[in-house]
Image (cartoon, rainbow, N blue to C red):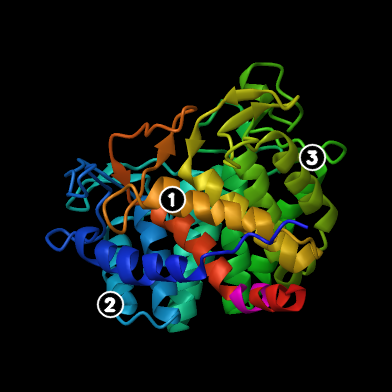
Amino acid sequence: MLAQKSINFTAVNDWLFDQALPFWAEAGVDRVNGGFVEHLTLKAENAHAPFKRVRAQARQIYCFSQAALLGWSDGAAVADHGWDFLQRHGRREDGAWVRRLAPDGSQLDTTCDAYDMAFVLFAHAWRHKVTKDPAVEASALATLDALDRTLAHPSGLGWLAEEGDAGPRQQNPHMHLIEAAIELAETTGNERFQAFGRTIAALFGERILNRETGVLREFFAPDWSALDTPAGRIVEPGHQLEWAWILERAAPILEIDMSREADLLHAHAEKHGIAPVTGLTYDQVDVDGKVILGDHRSWPQTEALKANLAMLEGRGLDTRDRIAVCVDNLLERYLAPAPTGTWIDQLDSKLKPRVDKIPSTTLYHVQLAFTELLRLQPAIQSMDADAA
């Protein structure tokens, strides 16, 4: 019998708490204008980007809020700094949130975008987890109102990707909206957030996911039917794996059972979306499982880790070897070669870096995956001990 591949929990913990969080709390914070830096150069220096995406501000608020809850001493102050900047600059007069800010906080792109709205809601959830401030819950509810007023699709089936959107329907904003709904429902106990999440889950199960095959397309026709174009055939294994984790996370909070859908998503992505030699997740395959884009962004690797953790915890599958491969790939291929506390965001099909910057938004992906791994460390180590 082959030996169980070990998981390097110590390296994960050290990278997150001793390297990444201290680094981004310093180099990633704009102490002049407020908020967070959009991206760094490949030497991990401020690239002085001419904009700050609202989604990037919101993701960093999550990162440092969670760090505070996990006992990292500077987390609360850094999260406060980001929250203040977002509150002062990010909202429109009608209650919706903008897409891009200038470095000083003035509004560059006032478009209401569902993806950005999702992360604003996510930031509200983590702000509430730290503060338990009723005003944060009220602000999240007002944001939900603005989402419905501004982006609700005329069909009643989900939301537009952005104001005036006439293009294909997109699953990705809905994935992050339910992610935010789960966290808001958990921290506030407000039934409206639970109902919001259930609505998205139902849409996903009934319209978005192919429940026979496990195929999750990225783009759809207006009624969520298959889009007969090359774009309509795109499948991103990272999103399949991300949804699998989200559905398992949703089960106790939204009081739904979508374990069959999670199983389908995980199985399809593991069968068609994973490079056989390296265990890396591909960026894109088509609906038949053929590789379209054989590059490997960093975030699909974090979603593979999260999904396999969810399958172990929620579905009882022994995915420890896959978890170990995902951890090793992240540590060795994406984190170790980069400046301390940062990452290489994308590898090409020959495993060479395809990058020109270090985006701040990647911390959300890596931190969420690594904190999930560390949360399950006792259970995994108990399994290891029982098998010894």
Residue 130: x %, y % from top left: 44, 80
Is any atom of residue 364 visible in this view?
A: yes
Residue 264, image x, y percentages: 80, 46
The answer to whether the residue labelled 1 contacts the one labelled 2, judged by CB atoms less than 8 Å apart, is no
Q: CA distance from mark 2 to mark 3?
A: 43 Å
In the rendered image, the residue lying farthest to the left is: 32
Q: Nearer the viewer, residue 262 or 218?
A: 262
Q: Point out residue 277 in the picture as x, y percentages from the top left corner.
A: 61, 36
Specify few, some or many for label 2: CA neighbours under 10 Å numbering under 14, 14-19, or 20 or more: some
Q: Residue furthest right?
A: 212
- Alpha carbons under labels 1 and 2: distance apart: 31 Å
What residue does disc 1 label?
332
Picture residue at 47% right of the left edge, 83% below the top: 132
Q: Pick whichever, 313 or 116, lies toward us.
A: 313
Residues in magenta? 376-380
Callout 3 secondary element? loop
Residue type at tag 2 = Ala
